[in-house]
């Protein structure tokens, strides 16, 4: 016992000495500059360059840029549909996500904490599995057909894509808005209430306009997610083509030029739309202040609020949670029919499954670690305008690139780049690919959060004698811990469930979602309960990890 | 204009009493200042009136009608928080028009009211500015205008001048009272600045640990405080420990340390009872020669403090107790030098007498 205590004390001393040494080092402007340079260099050379250079190199290497008129027409319509679907879904996400985020933050009950964790479920289900799950739920007799009648089931196509995209982009809005509402100063709302504004009026005219930057960031993330998703969309699209489905179909048909040109077109359009929304929205002056006191008072009444909460929960359960988990329901049978015993005994297909699970988590942990360590300085650079206004704007815009680029196109681009960069082991290509794919999620969340901290706090700490690293560790970090955690959660879960780009970059290594795709497609013969159990294991372990992580890190004081 | 009544109102946070069985009334059109140290429950009291907190016990009445169940937006009581909470995305005019709009006025009417109120606070020229473009003093006036324009008849001001510099605070506090009185509304103003409270309030309420210790006109609270804490908070005084030596119909005599005797006004006290005597600094006369007064003591100047228009002397009495004397500035040089032996005097009517506090004098003088 004594020994263990001495050992623990020794470890703390080493940690303390290490932190003190880093703090001392951080006093040197040269060291600080070096840290920022390494982080920025990593971002530009390892994260962004492979994503952009890979696709551009392929474009330059194309023998011909001409496409047949029919292909051009298909491509144009597909790209337009991508944006129509993306903008529709993101708007629906905002409409439905804000009330749910509000419910989670303001109700503060045990069940809302669980709800908060449940909102992450779509993140942790592999996207392809998600596609199959949504398809099974909405278009088969065993899904919604069992309740509403087989003729009410939806067929593959645009509506199903909207439902699918809503299911996986909805949590993005909820996650970001929960963070925004937690950081929001309620005094504004209180002032509005005592000036006679009903709760609804106060939120509509005061809270939401103040939170506009966060809301915009959430909207853009959801839009990016919708524009770039490939694996699951293919599953539910049927004959319908949006941008990413077109790329996939063109690839399958051997139309190499169409693949590259449509990828570049989609990326360019996305960048333009993003730039437009980002530049124009903040400049829109607030609309004239209008209030409809009687109507809005009715909307704020207890019964209406209850109804709104009920509708939010219903939307979440019916359109997000149930469709996402539908494919995992047969896992219940797996307990009864003994499949779970086989799984635990590591026999049959389970041996490969557990190795791929381990690989998934190792890759996700490494990608999260790299992003947290090397993404943080870049987030600070952006938030604090450290490299001048113009350079900051460029870096800020580039951060969005990995989430805008369709994942399949990104995978193709990364594979092309890294395979031409020499003999990098496949495992590390996988880690780097996942780092690129998930980079934006962390940096976006942290940059927004650091921006929300008054620089005076950091300045005060500096004048009290704290070295830059200490200021960061003791002031900035504790104040941004929710965003840090949600950023890390987004990175981790996105990495664990990533399928499209992963299958493109790795030929031999199979992460769990890629293996599950093989199971779904029948290239490995498994039963439906084995498949459900596999998805269930992947989702459950991630979910548990999230719940534990959240309960340890986020012990929020109770509201009075 | 509403009157406000508290009947046995209690509020706890995690078991800790923030407001303890508060019972008081605020008359219609009255300007009340709530004074107390940090953590005494001032803001909680204000938030209870605003409807932002619900009492655990007791009843709050507006014009005799219970309002415990009435939501904040229906109370017609405007809360102006310490940092003003001006909506950063709205212009000054929109901020001020917010209340009338929220209460159902048409846009034109609301803007007209806002313009008139901005005129009142002399900020018409900045109507189109954003709050971030205004100085602290201007922001304070916009917050006040926003409250006045809302049509509410009860204004709840939480440290309204706390964020301003001293000179501006002095200037604005009279303007604040003037505007409130002009509008004929009831105001409850929370502050920890006793000068501010004394100069603007019709009545001052002193709070400590959630309990109301005193509630009276400023002059009464100053001259006849209900306890040592109140006497010390309002104006400061020198406190001397003693024992009642003699009780007469018109006076009592108290023996302090070293056997010195002090005559104090008559109080229902018994002989040998432990008491504390309080003497306001400005009521203590000092002179190089022996003075003629009801209470005369001997002492030595220990320190002289320059305070602008006045000078304060710290005097060590022959019994070892310390007493303070404040005089208007007579000249650049102090009239009394340190170590100088002097005579100290004060009238019997200037002595405040308190029973000895159960937790000791030091505890009563602690401000936090």
Image: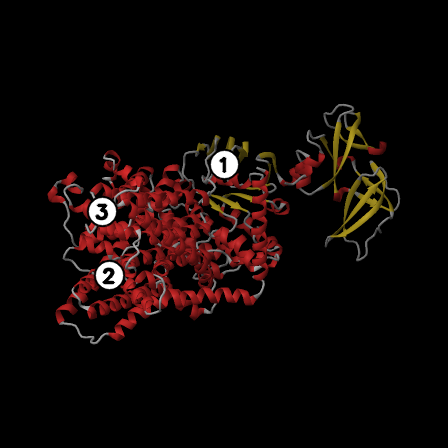
Q: Looking at this rendering, what residue extends furthest in the left direction?
A: A151
Q: Mark 2 points at which residue?
A: A83
Q: Do the residues labelled 3 and 1 touch (CB within 8 Å)?
A: no
Q: Residue B4 carries which label?
A: 1
Quarter residue A141 falls in:
top left
Residue B323: image x %, image y %? 78, 41
At horizontal 15% and vertical 68% (from top left) the residue drawn is: A71
Chain ID of residue with mark 1: B
User: Are marks 2 and 1 in one subunit?
Assistant: no
Q: In this view, does A109 lie to the left or right of A514?
A: right
Of the numbered discs 3 and 2, the one sitting upstream in the chain is: 2
At horizontal 50% and vertical 44% (from top left) the residue drawn is: B156
Quarter residue A270 falls in:
bottom left
Q: Which mark is residue A133?
A: 3
Q: Which mark is residue B272?
A: none
Circle nearer the viewer, 3 or 2: 3
Question: What distance separates the C-alpha of mark 2 from that of mark 1?
Answer: 58 Å
User: Are marks 3 and 2 in one subunit?
Assistant: yes
Between A195 and A175, the residue placed more toward the observer is A175
Mark 2 neighbour class, 10 Å CA radius: few under 14, some 14 to 19, many 20 or more: many
Q: Looking at this rendering, what residue extends furthest in the front direction?
A: A347
Between B34 and A343, the residue placed more toward the observer is A343
Q: Are marks 2 and 1 in contact (CB under 8 Å)?
A: no
Residue A359: image x %, image y %? 35, 52
Chain ID of residue with mark 2: A
For mark 1, give the secondary structure.
strand
Quarter residue A250 falls in:
bottom left
């Amino acid at each position: 016992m004594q020994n263990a205590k001495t050992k623990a004390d020794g470890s703390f001393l080493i940690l303390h000495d290490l932190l003190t040494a880093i703090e001392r080092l951080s006093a040197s402007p040269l060291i600080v500059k070096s840290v920022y340079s390494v982080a920025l260099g990593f971002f530009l050379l390892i994260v962004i360059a492979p994503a952009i250079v890979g696709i551009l190199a392929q474009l330059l290497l194309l023998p011909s840029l001409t496409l047949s008129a029919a292909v051009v027409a298909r491509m144009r319509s597909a790209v337009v549909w991508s944006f129509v679907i993306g903008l529709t879904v993101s708007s629906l996400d905002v409409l439905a996500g804000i009330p749910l985020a509000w419910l989670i933050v303001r109700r503060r009950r045990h069940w809302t904490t669980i709800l908060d964790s449940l909102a992450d479920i779509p993140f942790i289900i592999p996207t392809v599995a998600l596609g199959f799950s949504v398809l099974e739920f909405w278009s088969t007799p065993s899904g919604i057909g069992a309740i509403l009648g087989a003729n009410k089931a939806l067929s593959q196509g645009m509506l199903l894509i909207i439902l699918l995209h809503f299911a996986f982009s909805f949590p993005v809005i909820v996650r970001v808005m929960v963070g925004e509402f937690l950081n929001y100063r309620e005094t504004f709302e209180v002032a509005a209430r005592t000036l006679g504004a009903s709760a609804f009026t106060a939120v509509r005219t005061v809270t939401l306009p103040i939170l506009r930057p966060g809301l915009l960031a959430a909207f853009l993330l959801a839009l990016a997610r919708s524009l770039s998703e490939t694996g699951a969309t293919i599953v539910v699209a049927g004959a319908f083509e949006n941008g990413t489905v077109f790329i996939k179909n063109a690839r399958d048909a051997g139309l190499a030029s169409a693949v590259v040109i449509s990828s570049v077109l989609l990326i360019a359009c996305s960048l333009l739309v993003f730039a437009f929304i980002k530049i124009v929205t903040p400049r829109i002056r607030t609309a004239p202040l209008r209030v409809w006191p009687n109507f809005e008072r009715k909307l704020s009444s207890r019964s209406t609020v209850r109804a709104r909460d009920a509708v939010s929960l219903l939307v979440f359960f019916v359109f997000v949670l149930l469709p996402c988990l539908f494919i995992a329901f047969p896992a219940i049978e797996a307990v009864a029919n003994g499949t779970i015993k086989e799984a635990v005994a590591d026999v049959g297909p389970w041996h490969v499954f557990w190795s791929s699970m381990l690989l998934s988590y190792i890759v996700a942990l490494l990608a999260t670690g790299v992003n947290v360590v090397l993404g943080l300085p870049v987030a600070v650079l952006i938030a604090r305008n450290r490299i001048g206004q113009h350079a900051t704007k460029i870096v800020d815009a580039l951060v969005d690139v990995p989430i805008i680029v369709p994942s399949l196109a990104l995978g193709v681009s990364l594979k092309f780049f890294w395979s031409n960069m020499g003999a990098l082991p496949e495992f590390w290509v996988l880690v780097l690919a996942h780092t690129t794919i998930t980079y934006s999620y962390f940096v976006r969340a942290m940059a927004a959060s650091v921006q929300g901290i008054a620089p005076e706090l950091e300045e005060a700490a500096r004048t009290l004698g704290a070295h830059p690293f200490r200021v960061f560790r003791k002031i900035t970090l504790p104040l941004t811990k929710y965003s840090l955690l949600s950023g890390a959660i987004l990175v981790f879960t996105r990495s664990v469930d990533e399928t499209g780009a992963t299958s493109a970059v790795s030929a031999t290594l199979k992460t769990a979602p890629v293996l599950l795709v093989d199971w779904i497609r029948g290239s490995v013969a498994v039963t439906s309960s084995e498949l459900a159990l596999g998805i269930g294991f992947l989702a459950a372990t991630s979910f548990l990890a999230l719940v534990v992580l959240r309960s340890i890190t986020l012990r929020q004081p109770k509201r009075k | 204009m509403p009157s406000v009544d508290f009947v046995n109102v209690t509020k706890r946070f995690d078991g800790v009493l923030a407001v303890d069985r508060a019972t008081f009334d605020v008359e219609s059109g009255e300007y009340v200042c709530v004074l107390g140290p940090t953590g005494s429950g001032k803001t909680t009291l204000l938030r209870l009136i605003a409807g932002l907190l619900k009492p655990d016990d007791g009843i709050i009445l507006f014009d005799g009608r219970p309002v415990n169940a009435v939501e904040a937006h229906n109370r017609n009581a405007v809360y102006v928080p310490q940092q003003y909470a001006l909506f950063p995305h709205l212009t000054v005019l929109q901020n001020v028009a917010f209340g009338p709009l929220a209460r159902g006025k048409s846009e034109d009417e609301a803007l007209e009211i806002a313009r008139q109120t901005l005129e009142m606070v002399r900020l018409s020229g900045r109507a189109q500015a954003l709050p971030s473009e205004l100085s602290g003093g201007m922001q304070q006036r916009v917050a006040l205008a926003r409250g006045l324009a809302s049509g509410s008849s009860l204004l709840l001001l939480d440290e309204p001048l706390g964020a301003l510099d001293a000179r501006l605070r002095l200037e604005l506090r009279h303007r604040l009272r003037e505007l409130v009185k002009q509008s004929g509304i009831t105001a409850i103003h929370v502050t920890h600045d006793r000068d501010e409270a004394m100069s603007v309030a019709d009545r001052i309420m002193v709070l400590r640990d959630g309990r109301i210790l005193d509630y009276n006109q400023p002059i009464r609270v100053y001259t006849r405080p209900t306890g040592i804490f109140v006497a010390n908070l309002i104006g400061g005084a020198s406190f001397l420990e003693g024992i009642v030596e003699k009780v007469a119909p018109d006076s009592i005599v108290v023996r302090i340390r070293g056997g010195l005797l002090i005559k104090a006004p008559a109080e229902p006290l018994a002989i040998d009872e432990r008491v504390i005597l309080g003497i306001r600094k400005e009521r203590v006369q000092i002179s190089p020669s022996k003075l003629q007064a009801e209470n005369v003591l001997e002492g030595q100047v220990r320190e002289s403090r320059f305070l602008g228009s006045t000078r304060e002397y710290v005097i060590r009495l022959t019994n070892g107790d310390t007493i303070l004397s404040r005089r208007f500035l007579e000249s650049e040089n102090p009239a009394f030098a340190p170590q100088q032996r002097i005579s100290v005097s004060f009238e019997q009517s200037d002595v405040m007498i308190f029973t000895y506090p159960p937790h000791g004098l030091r505890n009563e003088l602690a401000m936090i």
